[in-house]
Amino acid sequence: MSEDHIDWGYLERKAWEVLKKYPLCDRCLGRLFARLGHGLSNKDRGRAIKTSLIMTLHKMIIEGAPQSIFTDVAPNIGGPASGLYRKLTGQDLEERTCAICGGRLETFIEEAVERAIPLIKAYGVKRFIVGARVSPPILEREERIKEEYKLEHGESIRAEIRREIGKLIQERIDAVAEFERPEATILVEFPSGAVWIQVNSLLLRGRYWKLGRMISQAYWPTPEGPKYFSIEQALWPLLKLTGGERVILHASGREDVDARMLGTGRPMVVEVKVPRRRDIPLQEMEETINKSNRWVKIALEGYATRQDITLYKSEEARKEKTYKALIAVEGGVAEEELRKIEEELTGRVIMQRTPTRVLHRRPDILRRRRVLETSCKTLTKTLAECLITAEGGLYVKELISGDNGRTTPSFSEILGRGAECVELDVVAVKL
């Protein structure tokens, strides 16, 4: 009986064609047909295909086919063929090494799981994903076999490694593979066996209030120590609570170091790098921060995502902010002059070149920002207080002084004499 006259199905025929040339372990054979059937692992699928093939070949031998139809391919089939091979030849089968994984995949998956579990536990991770790096020659061999035999129902060895490691971890510890909000990525490398963890930051959404002046937003180190106390320093107690390595503040804009942040507070996302604890109640974290200093207060509203950080940054030009400015006017200012300022500036687009005071660190560009509302009152002969609501990104101090004509119109331009911002507070940030 020739091979051309063997009556078998698609799986047996394709498996026979492949295994005549390439020795494959159960996993690597099963993976070539991974999208056929449901609820089977590739290991089980490959073993089932081999078993069916062996039974079919045995039937052919019983019906008169030469034993070589089986014995020639048995070393490439491997373990499942050993019993029939011994029965027919009286010898033990010498299995050949898998042409794709080199016979290492099964052991690799088990060892990777054993190495990954302590890493997950060490960082208190409850939600994870698995990433796999596979040697290019292995990927190339697998693709070559698929193309050579026109196998259209397979998956990649990378996909199997990710899935099987994730499944086994879930079975053994209290953690789940979750793609939407993973706390860490377990990275594995085949066939080297390297396993490491990439811990995602803990992201907290909230607001901060800056109750004093000369407080910077970001940590500002100098050789003599921090230049100013900062909002980020106020958040450092989170490091002790979470075991994290670093705190980064992502805020919706920033106020000058000498300006207070009052009223509604400023929206922010707090990022804790490489935390070892994540299960701390928001209230406990908030209280710990607020007890640690008297000048910065925060409120934590929930957990955040990277998309929240992007939103806070990208929407800067469209946010409304309200400022309270204490203004000193050269030669004094009258109520009717303040009414003129309100009329001139409310609804007006301000043309503003980068202020002189920040030119050393920012490009010299022209900004257009709208003043939405202005309300002023006199406090003394030379002092006025103004509430100014404007689009985000407007430099309010320069709106008042004019910055030698770099901002127009300005308080100074409208009054026809010098005006300076003595104190500035941010009282509302609308996101």
Image (cartoon, grey):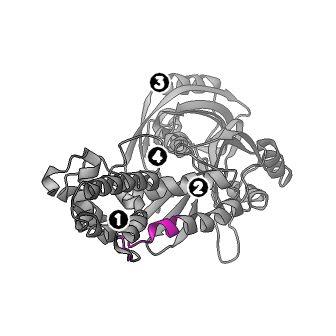
Q: Nearer the viewer, mark 1 or mark 2?
A: 1
Q: Nearer the viewer, mark 4 or mark 3?
A: 4
What amino acid is labelled 4 in the image?
Answer: Leu
**What span is colored magenta in the figure?**
94-109
Residue under label 2, please give it. 168
Horizontal arrangement in the rendering, residue 320 relative to residue 208 (left or right) = left
Mark 2 / mark 3, whichever is N-terminal:
2
- Which residue sits at x=58%, y=22%? 339
Q: Secondary structure at mark 1?
A: helix
Image: 377 above or below 128: above
Residue 281 percent location from the top left of the image: 79, 44
Tell me, for residue 347, which label it has, or none: 3
For numbered disc 3, what is the local secondary structure?
A: loop
Query: What's the residue at 63%, 58% (across, down)?
Result: 218
How far apart are the alpha carbons under marks 1 and 3? 81 Å
Q: Is residue 412 above or below residue 212?
A: above
Q: Which residue is mark 1?
A: 77
The amino acid beneath tag 2 is Leu
Q: Residues within 10 Å of mark 4 (few under 14, many from 20)?
A: some
Q: Nearer the viewer, mark 2 or mark 3?
A: 2
Q: Secondary structure at mark 4?
A: loop
Please tell me whether the stretch drawn in magenta is mainly helix, strand or loop: loop
SS for callout 2: helix
Q: Position of residue 190 (x, y in %)?
A: 44, 69
Question: Disc number at residue 40?
Answer: 4
Tell me whether circle 4 and circle 1 mark residues in contact (CB < 8 Å).
no
16 lies above or below 311: below
